[in-house]
């Protein structure tokens, strides 16, 4: 049940699950949304981020103090990432729809309330001061990110994730992340190993990107 | 003097659904095909990408993808004793002017017509007696049946990646689907769309009242899908920019996404954009077409000779081309004789404005053109018309299409149209209002028709198409009945504080949007006395000219037209390949 809901929850906050038939309209909200609605606590999250909890090691070890990882590491920034996105990802690590050997045991050690609190904590942290990106020279990565590719039926990344690299909404994350992280995610979507995207939106696109396309996209966003 | 080009086998006028589908089919069969599209070529990438495409002012208010009313429009009057005036901007419907046509800026609501629609006159006469039809109503049976068309509906379903849950597979009613659905040979290729909150509230209330609500079928792909042409469609992301926009996601079916990339790879298929066709040129005996004359992007007049001419322009623009070319006898409402321009219909649409208390957030921007819960309990002849005294029906639904901020300004009836009271109401209700929409059938009447305007001309000096139309009494009764049902459902919905019905009244307004489903003028029939084309869309008077699309509808059903238009396109393409080409220039025997 939880798995079905997690797969179904998608890029928009309260759109319900995909229907198996066409005469049923009431669908329960996804688990992460229920957890977020239950509490406003950030203190628990702040503590777990710094110290860990039981078998869950401290988030700060990889994701940096306040959710900003050290330059040159492959770990994604969490500071200022939307609360809904972080909460949903932790639920997805926990239920396996986003398999990850490092994150799965951590997520499994966390309760619903702890996940919600961590998500609130990271969302409340300041986004690190952005270096103004140099205007990217026209290249394939920029083209894909901003315009897509017509013969491949790939829309622009910016359509959903925003054209200013701050993300596209509650569960549409900002893409300005280390290149190694972006590459790993697109590869995982491509193989279907990561399958927590709504209606297969990301898997379908990743399958049509070549290795070279994935690399230039990752480089483009790493430089933003 | 027009420049003449080398002859081709087939010229198709218009690069929308019908031109793209038929053009591709005939080119794949080896014929040398040219599609003449008057608009500009626009493709999903880069033309429909965000943020540029999400511009309500440009696309909806300023009609970026619609016919340019400054160069070509329609004139309108309600009655023959009035003088028609030109529409200076689009309000009643949105004809297209770009590659893909209305098949690019549509919403994607996707239906098959009910079997009753194809035998409307005989079915109602048999069940209720001939007097159920009001005097002057010229509704007539189609020359083909639903069963004949079913394989072609099926084919189009798998081209557009239709989403839905089958209600009737080969005659067996399927639990969980629409119990009124006509039989289908295969399930929908994709599952139903997600349900917006307001639509869910509607479905709950309708079910409680004993109706049969279901999720509207759509041509918006709900999962990654490779269509029948091997082309990729992506999952809809419910961005809410469908109607009047090109889809940024390759999710909404359009000729650009579903057919043209394959057609353009065929060596026998050529697409020419910026080609505005003026007329079909006939031989001296006026029984055969020689080709078409068009104006190209540079303003030069070009003659394109062809063995076969297929009119694939926007619905009633096909009727205009017939009139401009002198094909078929123009209809005369005074005598009831003649056929071209006869049987004009629109869609008898109405609404119920719903306003909710502040506990109910509608979030109208979480939308898709065809994301709806709908019900067919009052469609076609699914209910007893005997005591009601009218013909036809309509579907009732809540479809959450768009929360775009210029157009979406719901305020309760009685609110001033400007000033501080309006501002207060628009703030209060933006997220707490949605209409129930009602889409009703439309019957043709003797005084409703299309003709060439005697006064007004387009930018190329040709007479505009003149629409003469008012609602028959039948459709006014229908609208009152359906709107009242909608009000009752609205009142049963959670959180509703106001449910205000807006049924259609006379006179028919040319200044209110009533869907882009404008039809007729080249009715398909079994008898040349009351139809322009035979059951394959072939002109009775000029057999090497075919007509496609909604111009063929003898009357309009309550269902959106595109599914039926698509099925008819495959039907016509098959008839040409199978029968017409064996004896070109002759009428296909029925």
Image (spheres, coloured by chain):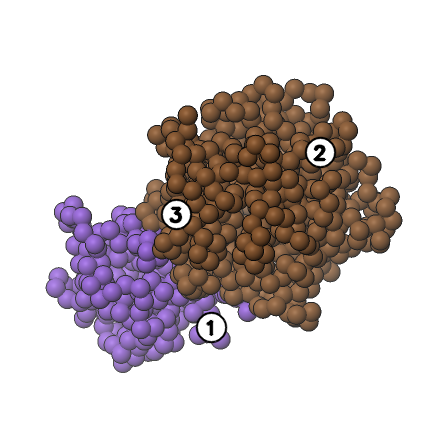
Chain colours: A purple, B brown
Viewer-closest of B154 and A207: B154
* Outermost residue toward the left in this view: A72
Callout 1 and callout 3 share a chain: no
Q: Secondary structure at mark 1?
A: helix
At x 56% / y 56%, what residue is drawn? Answer: B582
Q: Chain of mark 2?
A: B
Please tell me which of labels 3 and 2 falls first in the chain: 3
Dot 2 and dot 1 residues touching (CB under 8 Å): no
B302 relative to A202, above or below: above
Secondary structure at badge 3 equals strand
Residue A4's disc is: 1
Circle number at residue B338: 2
Q: Residue at x 59, y 56 (%)?
A: B579
Instruction: Answer left or right for B230 relative to A164.
Output: right
Report the side of B275 relative to A149 (left or right): right
The reply to whether discs 1 and 3 touch (Cβ–Cβ < 8 Å) is no
Q: Is residue B288 visible?
A: yes
Image point (44%, 74%), residue name? A3
CA separation in Å, label 1 and label 3: 47 Å
Q: Between residues B363 and B260, which one lies in front from this camera angle?
A: B260
Q: Residues within 10 Å of mark 2 (few under 14, many from 20)?
A: some
Which quadrant does the N terminus of chain B fall into?
top left
* Quarter-of-image position of residue A140: bottom left
Q: Could you tell me residue B293's position as x and y percent?
A: 46, 33
Eye-nearest disc, 1 or 3:
3
């Amino acid at each position: 049940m939880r798995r079905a809901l997690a797969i179904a929850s998608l890029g928009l906050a309260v759109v319900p699950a995909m229907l198996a038939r066409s005469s049923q309209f009431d669908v329960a909200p996804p688990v992460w949304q229920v957890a977020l609605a239950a509490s406003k606590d950030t203190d628990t999250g702040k503590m777990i981020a710094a110290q860990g909890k039981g078998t869950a090691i401290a988030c700060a070890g990889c994701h940096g103090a306040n959710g900003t990882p050290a330059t040159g590491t492959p770990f994604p920034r969490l500071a200022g990432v939307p609360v809904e996105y972080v909460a949903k990802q932790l639920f997805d690590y926990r239920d396996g729809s986003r398999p990850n050997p490092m994150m799965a045991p951590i997520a499994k050690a966390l309760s619903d309330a702890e996940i919600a609190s961590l998500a609130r904590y990271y969302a409340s942290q300041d986004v690190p001061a952005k270096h103004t990106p140099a205007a990217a020279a026209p290249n394939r990565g920029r083209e894909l990110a901003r315009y897509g590719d017509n013969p491949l039926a790939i829309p622009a990344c910016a359509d959903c994730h925003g054209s200013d690299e701050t993300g596209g909404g509650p569960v549409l994350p900002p893409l300005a992340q280390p290149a190694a992280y972006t590459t790993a995610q697109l590869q995982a979507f491509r193989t279907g190993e990561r399958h927590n995207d709504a209606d297969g939106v990301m898997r379908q696109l990743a399958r049509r990107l070549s290795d070279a396309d994935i690399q230039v996209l990752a480089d483009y966003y790493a430089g933003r | 003097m027009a420049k003449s080009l080398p002859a081709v086998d087939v010229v198709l006028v218009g690069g929308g659904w019908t031109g793209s589908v038929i053009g591709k089919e005939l080119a794949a069969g080896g014929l040398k095909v040219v599609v003449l599209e008057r608009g500009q070529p626009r493709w999903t990438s880069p033309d429909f990408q965000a943020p540029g495409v999400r511009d309500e002012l440009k696309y909806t208010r300023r009609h970026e993808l619609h016919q340019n009313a400054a160069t070509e429009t329609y004139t309108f009057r309600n009655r023959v004793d009035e003088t028609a005036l030109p529409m200076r901007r689009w309000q009643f419907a949105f004809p297209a002017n770009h590659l893909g046509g209305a098949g690019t800026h549509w919403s994607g609501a996707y239906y098959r017509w009910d079997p009753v629609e194809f035998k409307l006159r005989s079915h109602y006469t048999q069940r209720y007696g001939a007097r159920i039809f009001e005097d002057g109503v010229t509704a007539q049976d189609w020359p083909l049946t639903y069963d004949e068309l079913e394989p072609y509906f099926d084919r189009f379903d798998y081209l557009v990646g239709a989403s839905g849950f089958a209600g009737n597979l080969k005659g067996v009613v399927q639990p969980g689907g629409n119990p009124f659905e006509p039989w289908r040979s295969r399930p929908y290729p994709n599952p139903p769309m997600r349900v917006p909150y307001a639509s869910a509230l509607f479905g709950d209330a309708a079910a409680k009242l004993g109706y049969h609500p279901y999720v509207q079928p759509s041509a918006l792909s709900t999962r990654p899908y490779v269509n029948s042409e091997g082309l990729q469609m992506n999952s809809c992301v419910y961005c809410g920019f469908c109607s009047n926009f090109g889809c940024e996601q390759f999710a909404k079916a359009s000729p650009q996404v579903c057919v043209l990339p394959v057609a353009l790879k065929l060596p026998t298929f050529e697409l020419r954009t910026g080609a505005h066709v003026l007329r079909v040129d006939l031989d001296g005996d006026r029984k055969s077409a020689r080709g078409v004359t068009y104006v190209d992007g540079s303003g030069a007049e070009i003659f394109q000779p062809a063995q076969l001419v297929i009119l694939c322009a926007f619905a009633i623009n096909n009727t205009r081309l017939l009139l401009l070319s002198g094909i078929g006898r123009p209809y005369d409402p005074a005598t009831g004789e003649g056929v071209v321009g006869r049987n004009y219909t629109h869609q008898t649409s109405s609404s119920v404005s719903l306003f909710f208390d502040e506990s109910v957030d509608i979030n109208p921007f979480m939308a898709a053109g065809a994301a709806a819960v709908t019900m067919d309990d009052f469609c076609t002849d699914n209910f007893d018309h005997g005591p009601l005294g009218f013909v036809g029906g309509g579907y009732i639904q809540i479809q959450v299409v768009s929360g775009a901020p210029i157009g979406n300004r719901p305020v309760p009836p009685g609110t001033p149209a400007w000033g501080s009271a309006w501002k207060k109401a628009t703030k209060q209700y933006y997220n707490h209002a949605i209409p129930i929409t009602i889409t009703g059938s439309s019957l043709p009447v003797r005084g409703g028709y299309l003709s060439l305007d005697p006064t007004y001309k387009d930018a190329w000096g040709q007479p505009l198409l003149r629409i003469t139309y008012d609602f028959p009494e039948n459709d006014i009764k229908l609208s009152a009945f359906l709107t009242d049902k909608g009000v009752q459902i609205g009142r049963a919905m959670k959180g509703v504080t106001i449910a205000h019905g807006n049924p259609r009244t006379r006179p028919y307004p040319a200044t209110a949007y009533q869907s882009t489903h404008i039809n007729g003028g080249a009715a398909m029939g079994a008898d040349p006395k009351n139809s322009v084309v035979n059951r394959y869309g072939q002109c009775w008077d000029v057999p090497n000219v075919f007509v496609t699309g909604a111009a063929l509808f003898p009357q309009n059903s309550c269902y959106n037209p595109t599914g039926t238009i698509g099925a008819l396109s495959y039907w016509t393409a098959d008839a040409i390949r199978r029968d017409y080409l064996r004896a070109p220039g002759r009428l296909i025997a029925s």
